[in-house]
Amino acid sequence: MDQARWEKIVQWPLLAASVLFLISYSWRVLADLDGPRNLLTLVVLVAAWLVFAVDYLVNLYLAPERRHWFITHLFDLVVVFLPVLRPLRLLRLVTLLPIFQRTPGQAVRSRVGLYLAAASSLLIWMGSLAVLDAERSAPRANITTVGDSVWWAFVTISTVGYGDYFPVTGTGRLVAVALMLGGVTLVGVITATLASWILERIVASGRTAELLVRHPGRGHTGPMLGELNDQEIDGVLHDAVIGRIGCHAGGQTYIVPVSYAYDGEHVYGHSGSGRKVAMMRDNPSVCFEVEHVDDLGNWRTVVAWGTFEELRGTDASASRELLVARFAPLLATAGAGYGSSATSSATAVPHLGPDGTPLPFRPLPDSRPASGAVPKPGPGPVRAHAPAPHPANHATDGSGQEAVLYRIRLTRKSGRFERS
């Protein structure tokens, strides 16, 4: 099992554990429980801790580069040891809402806004519960009710701090420090988002004005170079069907063109289990490049960086359907000559069989041949005495190799253009 599949399996159990923890901890603090109900909430809290701890350890074990994963996921480690932060896992729900499944450029500000609102609410509520639990029975405490603790959490996370209520215990002060840091972080995110929006508007206005100046008949002064914005980058990725993957392993760099489909977050592709796949399995950090060239003075190019993930089971089936949906219209409009010549078909569109069908999309028989038997010729290119393909893919790449369905999770994108 790889890390991507594990994360997909535990996604909803972790969200459920977060909800149960939030309910149990709130009930435990607000109702001041004792007896069986107190024991019940304690069992739920411990079970939630175990779920988060197991998830962290399994992810660390499955990570291709464990040291890098450990350094970049310190917050997950903090969540394991600081119970009050576990409900923040519910922020993952933001990315699951259909409204946020658009392209990153279209959804980023809405997603950030909802993140801020949800994170602020969860931090205020969990902070107020934690400080109330620590303070209400302490001598000289002034935070002894829910109203007092919620008010104190509001003014603390906003970094205002009226001073009318303040913690007197060590635990309460630690909670105060955590809320202050959370408040400063949220203000920083708000400022950065606002600055990004203003800068994008300035750049867009400047680009429009410069295009008007360079319009034919209005004083053309030469080519214009610039950077593509998020929407333009996604437009190039969506429109193209051929890109280049750059991978590096064993001291060698390999760049190869591939046909692909793009869903706004991942690049999906298929390949035989050759050099490219072997190198990406060895080092999943890859580069992806796409370009659209009208002529030497008018072009757009996008370079993206991401992580290779090999797909199996339902993920492989879903990616196959996405690729079929992307290429089927192109095959239908490219002409009826695909079935007439295996050579011309394979040259025009990669991975085509003699009948014009994309080979990775053609299912092979599910049953294995009897021991020692030679498989009968079927609709797909099966080699004699070869084992049946992996049940997740059930396809070959046309050379008899098992087809590998994969995706590249894009983590960073950059684009440039020239217009004349």
Image (cartoon, rainbow, N blue to C red):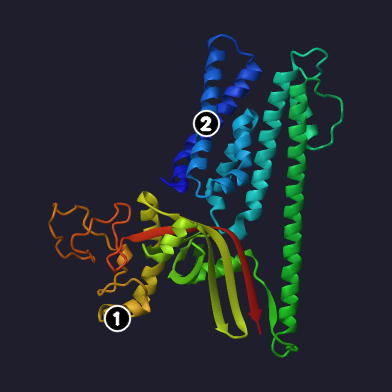
Q: Residues within 10 Å of mark 1 (few under 14, many from 20)?
A: few
Residue 165 horizontal side relative to residue 205, left or right? right
Viewer-nearest of labels 2 and 1?
A: 1
In the image, farthest residue toward the right: 163
User: Which element type, helix, strand or loop, lies under badge 2?
Assistant: helix
User: Which element type, helix, strand or loop, lies under badge 1?
Assistant: helix
Name the residue nearer the viewer: 356 or 287.
287
Instruction: Please identify the quarter of the rendering in which residue 80 is found.
Output: top right
Q: Is residue 182 above or below residue 136?
A: below
Residue under the image location 53 percent in, 46 percent down? 96
Q: Give the residue type that dot 2 points to.
A: Ala
Instruction: Please identify the quarter of the rendering in which residue 300 is found.
Output: bottom right
Q: Residues within 10 Å of mark 2 (few under 14, many from 20)?
A: many
In the image, farthest residue toward the top: 35
Measuring from the top left, give residue 416's x and y in whole percent.
64, 73
Measuring from the top left, give residue 241's x and y in whole percent.
46, 71
Residue 254 in view in this figure: yes
Mark 2 sits on what residue? 17
In the image, farthest residue toward the front: 251
Measuring from the top left, give residue 82's x and y in whole percent.
64, 30
Q: Which mark is residue 343?
A: 1
Q: Give the residue type that dot 1 points to.
A: Thr
Image quarter hosting the C terminus: bottom right
Residue 320 horizontal side relative to residue 412, left or right? left
Please report whichever mark, 2 or 1, sits nearer to the chain's N-terminal start. 2
Task: Give the spatial CA distance, label 2 vs label 1.
Answer: 56 Å
Measuring from the top left, give residue 228's x and y in whole percent.
64, 70
Residue under the image location 81 percent in, 20 percent down? 168
Q: Which mark is residue 156?
A: none
Q: Is residue 385 above or below residue 158?
A: below
Name the residue nearer the viewer: 286 or 337.
286
